[in-house]
Amino acid sequence: MLYGRSTELAALDELTAGAREGRSGALVLRGEAGIGKTALLDRTAQSASASGMRVLRVTGVEPEADLAFGGLVQLLWPVQDRLDGLPEPQADALRAVLGATRPPTRDRFLTGLAVLTLLADLAEQGPLLCLVDDAQWLDQATSDALLFAARRLAAEQVAMVFATRDEGFAAPGLTELRPSRLDTGDAVSLLADLGLPPALRDQVIAESAGNPLALIEFGAARRDDPGSFTPVTVADRVLSSYRTQIAALPEKTRLALLFAAAEGRGDLPLQMKAARTLGVGLEDLEDAERAGLIQVTESTVVFRHPLIGTAAYQGAVLARRIAVHQALADAADDPDCRARHLPLATTSPDDEVASELVAAAERAADRSAYAAASLLHQQAARLTPDRRAQVRRLTDAATCALNAGHGGQARDLAEQAERSSPEPEDLARLAPVRAAVMFESGERREAARLLLRTHAAGPGLGPAILRTGATYGWFAGDADSVREAAERLASLGEADPMVEGMAHLVDDDYARGLPLLERAVAAGQDGSDAARTRALHSAILLGDDAAAMELAAAEVARCRAQGLIGALPQALHLLAERQVLAGAHRDAEASVAEAVEIARDTGLRERVAWLGGVPARIAAIEGDERRCRDLVRDVPDVGRVAGESALSLLELARGDYEAALGRLETAAGPGPQRHMAMAMATVADQVEAAVRLGQSGRAERPMRAFEAWARAGGQPWALAVAHRCRALVDGREEDYREAVRLHGQGRRPFERARTALLYGEWLRRARRRSEARDTLRSALEDFEGLRAVPWAERARAELRAAGDATTSAKATAENVLDRLTPQELQVVRLAADGNSSREIAAQLFLSRRTVEHHLYKAYPKLGVGSRRELARLNLV
């Protein structure tokens, strides 16, 4: 009987009922030790099993908190026969977790996706309940995987419940429930079976502060010894009670309990194998079992409550703990299990032990368990007698911490390593880690300079460090770093056309810089992943929309195919920017929505904010001022050009030319970012604002730079916009005509429509009203297709002034795709292309049932009833 838990039980029953009805969900039970979390899980498991739900359960174990995927192995071991049904990259990731020999896992979030798919597959046979107790003691790799799965649950018939103490196991985004303390009435009911006198009972209730475990333990203790008194806090009182019980046991029984607590997993054969070396046998557990402290089966030993294990471990002297860990290490067949005990059994430097820990760290890193790998490298460093080797291991620890997303820890480890060695070679190995942390924390210029200084001190490091330094320098606005990196690469015979091109751009030498970027684009089309990445960024700098779109789409496809979940948000971001330029606003919003969801699920908070620049641009074009300003507010400094560009476009559309011009004059700043295609494209806004103000001279210098950039790059859209700008300033019709002609070869409908609008205005002022009407109708058609409301209104106003009396404000014809959510849009397009639900799920990192749930919701919105009908629709 659970007293005082009606609210908690109702929430858990609602969660499991939802799973049975096809609505997945996750819940976190958070509270102090003894508050009743495990009892709630037990009751939920019993109820779920009685209703036909399958139950998987795992309990975090404190000694295993740093063992890579220890919790996930425990959870998935009973269902490993289902791995063959997963997409191959996901199956490989879980096989690596479970110990099979497989290639290294390249993305630390792929395991979470594999867990989601596996749970969803299991739920195909009926609703599934996944229970996680003592989540605060899960290893980081297991926590990451389970939380990724929990956040992406939708319609899989899966319910997940995490029980955790107040400290540890941060689970942002999941609903939390805090079990309350018991009131006096429920406390009295709980103590009723102990037969305590009322005065003693009331004293127990007061001391227990409504904690159920404390009530039970204190009540039993007071019944046996009415005069006993315990420490102040409830947790200390309970722990003290357990220590007292353990202290009363025979010495060998206490030692047997120490083995159980130190081993942690409940592996009875391993415990007994190790314990025999210290003269302890199975019979020595009997007294503890009779006392109700442990439960023993043929293969396991489980403490009745984790605090009992804590009391058994903390109550032992250090020498005993060391001896027990050494015995467990010697008895272990699993090298990772041995590596877990060795550091706890070793008190002085030991190179042999350190080497074993390094091997374990490398195995953990191969499975993308970078947090565990970092700790193992740290432990290895502590036990390494040679100072240089110790520094190398600290550097490896810092690298793994960075890969795990723990930038602060990576910085601390790198600084510790730096203090330990002044050797240039050691500092050079540290530099990429330190620079990456600095760049992510906003110290971008310092990061670039650090890499260049490091390469100067040790030129044998190779070109990669210089390429990274150039990239950091570019985003930092540090032109000197870009130039220096290019010069160094050339001196090494490793000239990089992208870096060299960037170096010419910062010197305003477009005629030499852009052709080099074209070479980088061409070289990357069929090259390595790194070369294709450089080609993509080069295409963006060039303003080569066709190549950039193709390369961005290919990068997204690669991330999907290889399960590179951590890299996917950036790839989707770059694709979304290209989609906005192409006028595919709904596609861009779908790309951003997916990127935001994945970034949140994987803890990439800055990427979430940065992504706001894309929908802000769409909102600006469509005239949604409030949404635009809300989105721009959180865009970080590195995305300032995108944010300022969106706001200036709003101001330009509503005629606030001074504000728009002032914003654009300072948006890109003096650094390399002023040469980015987006910054270059905003020059047209500067020119228009300046001309409208009668101050075209304010835009003359950026316009000349833009014209030089457009001529050097040769992109039709850029040349068209350059002619439009010159037409605005000089008023020559031939520039307007050439701009219109070139737009016919380009891919930017918004810019095409703006050119048509301005040319139509010019024709109307020249009293060529018939020609003006034709040109303005073309502009209006494009603006309406883009839902560019303020611009469409301007086109209508010009049409009316040109004598088109039939033109009036009208509702934009509804596109049926607008009825869909971004994720529904992605799903129906993939389905229409003939992809199965399982194939779509693998591409979008969803479950098959969630894909079908989206299709079920999308069909009536589109007026179809099947995939066959879906394939007949125009979904562009």
Image (cartoon, helix red, strand yellow):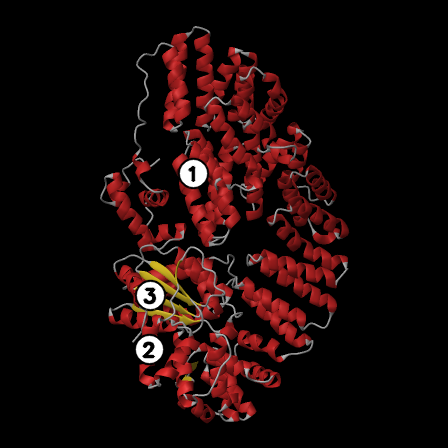
The residue singled out by tag 1 in the image is 588
Relative to 379, residue 443 above or below: above
Q: CA distance from mark 1 to mark 3?
A: 42 Å
Of badges 3 and 2, nearer the viewer stands: 2
The residue singled out by tag 3 in the image is 8
Can see residue 867?
yes
**Residue 696, how many percent across, how many down?**
59, 17
Q: Earlier in the sequence, mark 1 or mark 3?
A: 3
Mark 1 is surrounded, within 10 Å at the Cα level, by few (under 14), some (14 to 19) or many (20 or more) other residues, namely: many
Mark sitting on residue 188: 2
Relative to 792, residue 805 above or below: above
Inspect the image, locate mark 3, and give the three-letter code of the amino acid beneath it: Glu
In the picture, the quarter occupied by the N terminus is bottom left
Q: Earlier in the sequence, mark 3 or mark 2?
A: 3
Q: Secondary structure at mark 1?
A: helix
Q: Secondary structure at mark 2?
A: helix
Inspect the image, locate mark 1, and give the three-letter code of the amino acid beneath it: Ala
- Residue occupying image coordinates x 56% and y 21%: 687
- Residue occupying image coordinates x 40% and y 50%: 843
Nearer to me, 627 or 418: 627
Nearer to me, 699 or 352: 699
Q: CA distance from mark 1 to mark 2?
A: 61 Å
Relative to 36, residue 637 above or below: above
Mark 3 is surrounded, within 10 Å at the Cα level, by few (under 14), some (14 to 19) or many (20 or more) other residues, namely: some
Query: Quick check: marks 3 and 2 in contact, CB under 8 Å?
Result: no
Can see residue 88?
no
